[in-house]
Image: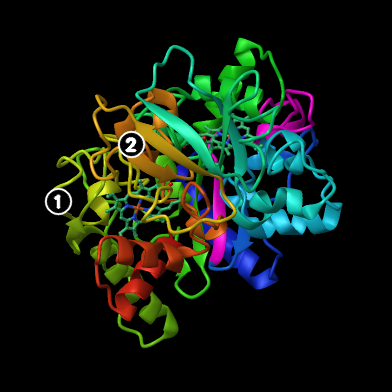
Amino acid sequence: MPFRFATRAAGALAVVAAAAGLMGQYGGAPIWWEAGSNERMPFSSVFKNNAGDLLVYNAGGETTAGTHPFFTPLGSNGRGCITCHQLSNAMSVSTDRMQERWATTGGRDAVFDTIDGANCPDLPQRERASHSLLLERGVFRIDQHWPAAGVTPDFTIEVVRDPTGCNTSAKYGLHAATPTISVYRRPRITGNLKYLDAGAAFTADSRATTLEAQVLDAIQKHEQGAAIAPEDIKRIVDFEREIYVAQGRDETAGDLSTFGAPPLLGAWSLGRTKPDSSASGMMTVANWAGNKPSAETDFRRSVERGSVLFSTRTFAITETANLHRGNGRTPVEGTCATCHSERMTGANAQQPWMDIGTTSLPWSGDQKDLPLFKVTCAANAAPHPYLGRVIYTNDPGRALVTGKCADVGSLVMQQLRGLAARAPYFTGGSAKDLRAVIDFYDRRFRARYTEQEKQDLVNFMSVL
Ligand code: HEC
Ligand code: HEC
């Protein structure tokens, strides 16, 4: 596709969307996709969100959903990949959208399917309370056999609190015929994936190291299907590698995708720019604000400051296991970009998973609606670098795959694109908005941001 056309089209789209006040769509792509529909996914689509418009760019060209395996049910529960990786939510889902779907379908949408769209399959399915985690946190149940095949763990797990009933359930729990652990996690973006291939870590615990393996995992876990033809796996993966998502227009700052906008913002630049591992830090937004006194200029200045804070404002990174620097105990001086180091996505190809405490006490705080596990590490195991040998966690993360005490709570970081379209944040959906993310970091790393700095960081995050 000629990019000159694409760049001009992005500007035009944003203008049309703004002028016509279109309720979040352009190019005919629906806001909510049912699996198996006959819609077409156009070359580009625009969806409204609280901060402006999200742009989804389908570099492979128009896709006919009815005949594409990403969009069609591959198992027995009527879901396709599209069900939980929705265009309008930057190829994830948001709690706003989940609540809307619950209201309009009386909870009958396939997304609420018992297998993982309910807190536990053995709860009464018509009741809203049985789906509270998906509705309030945007998380799906991920069930993992324990211990994982071929792994001899160096710790034991006990269930301390089980608000969903699933970890103590005779059928699904830790003492079932096939011992299983249920954790609850946000869907991750199935776009911009070309950039994540370098890290080769998909899902929060990196149980999948290739996109092909991830397709099989998804079909088995979410769609209750068994088999898929190799050519369909290839079509799904090829498709995922051609999808680019980013915020395209900001309500106040204006267009993020045309000439004059910072070069690395917007989905078009993602499509054009090669993964660039030499550059460190997400990006710095500069020379954008201009001098004209206006709300637009003020907001752009704030974004510029936010981008600089992101990559230059240092704090002591303490108690972070599996960080690529340090030993997890001695503080390391760093910035947001020390961890979110890849330029186009903010992911970290060098060391994709680490533990910043979002799912373990004390930093996670008391997450009463999630299960709480007690992990006890063997006396001869390498202890967790800062939590020692007894750990309380909502999600052991990477340790569910490796069986290692030192990996408890380590999670593969998400990419930071399309954030405005897909609240809430963190693997367990524990930060309800971007401000809550920044507040977490302010507390966690004692960054002592001023009110203005917090707002600048939020504004920067909201245009990515
Ligand atoms: C029921 C909802 C649901 C369905 C259906 C679903 N996914 Fe997902 N997807 C998720 C969740 C939840 C995660 C995060 C899992 C985790 O972190 O353990 C995820 C993660 C992923 C990731 C990892 C992205 C990353 O950056 O780590 C990819 C790729 C993906 N899904 C592709 C697919 C494909 C392909 C299909 C269809 C075959 C599919 N998904 C169907 C919910 C779903
Ligand atoms: C020590 C490493 C580290 C530092 C420093 C760090 N992050 Fe993160 N970040 C992570 C990890 C790991 C996750 C994934 C946590 C989870 O999923 O629960 C994450 C997740 C996020 C998310 C959530 C993305 C999503 O899709 O849910 C945002 C937003 C974010 N970080 C922004 C920032 C900002 C802004 C800063 C600086 C104030 C920062 N991070 C500093 C490691 C770090």
**Image quarter of residue 284:** bottom left
Which residue occupies 41% across, 86% down?
Answer: 294
How far across and how far down the image is residue 98, in percent?
A: 70, 53
Can you tell which mark lies on residue 332? 1
> Is disc 1 surrounded by few (<14), some (14 to 19) or many (20+) residues within 10 Å?
some
Q: Is residue 447 magenta?
A: no
- Helix, strand or loop at mark 1: strand
Residue 325 to residue 14: above or below: above
Q: Is residue 233 left or right of residue 106?
A: left
Q: Is residue 79 magenta?
A: yes
**Image quarter of residue 94:** bottom right
How far across and how far down the image is residue 370, in percent?
A: 56, 49
Identify residue type, mark 1.
Val
**Residue projecting furthest to the front:** 379
> Is disc 2 surrounded by few (<14), some (14 to 19) or many (20+) residues within 10 Å?
many
Pointers 1 and 2 in contact (C-beta within 8 Å): no
Identify residue type, mark 2.
Pro
- The image quadrant where one finds the C terminus is bottom left
Of labels 1 and 2, earlier in sequence is 1
Q: Which residue is mark 2?
A: 352
Which residue occupies 54% across, 57% down?
Answer: 424
Ligand 1 is located in which of the four quadrants? Answer: top right
Extent of the magenta region? 52-81
**Residue projecting furthest to the bottom:** 293
Residue 139 to residue 64: above or below: below
